[in-house]
Structures are given as structure tokens and as C-alpha cells.
């Protein structure tokens, strides 16, 4: 199947090798824990995680987009962000949280 024909649901069904990324030091142990908690969970579970610690998840997503270049993984994280914002557009404020002031949260989207 051509990548242009993939739906968000198809992309989100992928199993991403987060443990491999941690073992190669592309993500931290903390990032791995956050991703494991979030990955392949129900929308209500994800919503609760974002309500409790949204900026931490945004930070992980931005780091993955900045540091990992594997197309399947980039598409997956972009689909997670799309789903997160589609479910609640007000979550865009998470990208402006004061705890992320040392991050350029838009840089991975502009590269």
C-alpha cells in the first residue's frame, strides 16, 4: 500500500520499537515510560494522561520528531499529535506550557 493512502488508524496500529530507541539512546528511560503508558491506549486513558501531565507528553513527542528520522515512527508520532488535537483542540496550549520554555516545540514541524 502506498504511504499516501494510509489512514490515521492504520498508522496508529503500528508497533513502534520504543525499547530499541532507548537502547540506542535516541530516547530516555523516562520517555520510554511515558510512551508505554500512552501507546495503544484508549482515548479516555490518553485524555487523562494529557490532563495530568500533558507538557511531558508534548516534550516526548517533540523530542522523537527531532531525534528520530525513521519514517514509520515520525508518521506515528504525527498521528498521535493529530489525534490528540482533533479530540480536543484546546490541547494546543500544551505546546506553549511554561515548562517547555527551553524547547523550540515548533522546530520539528518546520524542518
Image: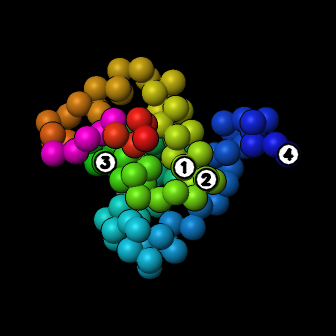
Q: Are marks 4 and 3 in contact (CB under 8 Å)?
A: no
- Mark 4 is surrounded, within 10 Å at the Cα level, by few (under 14), some (14 to 19) or many (20 or more) other residues, namely few
Give the crowd class for mark 3: few <14, some 14-19, many >=20 residues within 10 Å.
Answer: some
Q: CA distance from mark 3 to mark 2?
A: 19 Å
Q: Position of residue 67 (x, y in %)?
A: 41, 58
Instruction: Give the residue at x 52% y 57%.
Output: 69
Q: Which residues are magenta?
A: 102-106
| Label 2 to label 4: alpha-carbon separation | 15 Å
Q: Kindly identify which residue carries mark 1.
A: 74
Task: Give the CA distance from mark 4 to mark 3.
Answer: 32 Å
In the rendered structure, which disc, 3 or 2, sits on the residue that comes first in sequence? 3
Q: Mark 1, residues whose alpha carbon is within 10 Å: few (<14), some, or many (≥20)?
A: some
Q: Residue at x 20, y 34 (%)?
A: 97
- Pinpoint residue 19: horizontal percent, then vertical percent: 49, 73
Q: Which mark is residue 1?
A: 4
Residue 7 lies, with reference to residue 69, above or below; the image says above
The residue identified by callout 2 is 71
Name the residue carrying label 3. Answer: 59
Dominant SS type (magenta): loop
Judge depth for marks 3 and 1 and give the one in front: 1
Asked which secondary structure carries label 4, the reply is: loop
Amino acid at each position: 500500500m502506498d504511504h499516501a493512502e494510509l489512514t490515521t488508524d492504520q498508522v496508529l496500529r503500528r508497533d513502534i520499537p520504543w525499547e530499541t530507541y532507548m537502547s540506542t539512546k535516541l530516547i530516555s528511560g523516562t520517555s520510554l515510560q511515558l510512551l508505554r503508558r500512552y501507546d495503544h491506549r484508549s482515548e479516555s486513558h490518553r485524555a487523562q494522561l494529557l490532563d495530568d501531565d500533558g507538557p511531558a507528553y508534548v516534550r516526548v513527542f517533540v523530542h522523537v520528531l527531532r531525534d528520530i528520522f525513521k519514517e514509520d515512527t515520525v508518521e506515528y508520532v504525527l498521528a498521535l499529535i493529530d489525534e490528540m488535537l482533533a479530540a480536543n483542540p484546546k490541547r494546543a496550549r500544551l505546546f506553549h506550557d511554561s515548562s517547555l520554555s527551553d524547547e523550540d516545540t515548533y522546530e520539528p514541524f518546520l524542518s
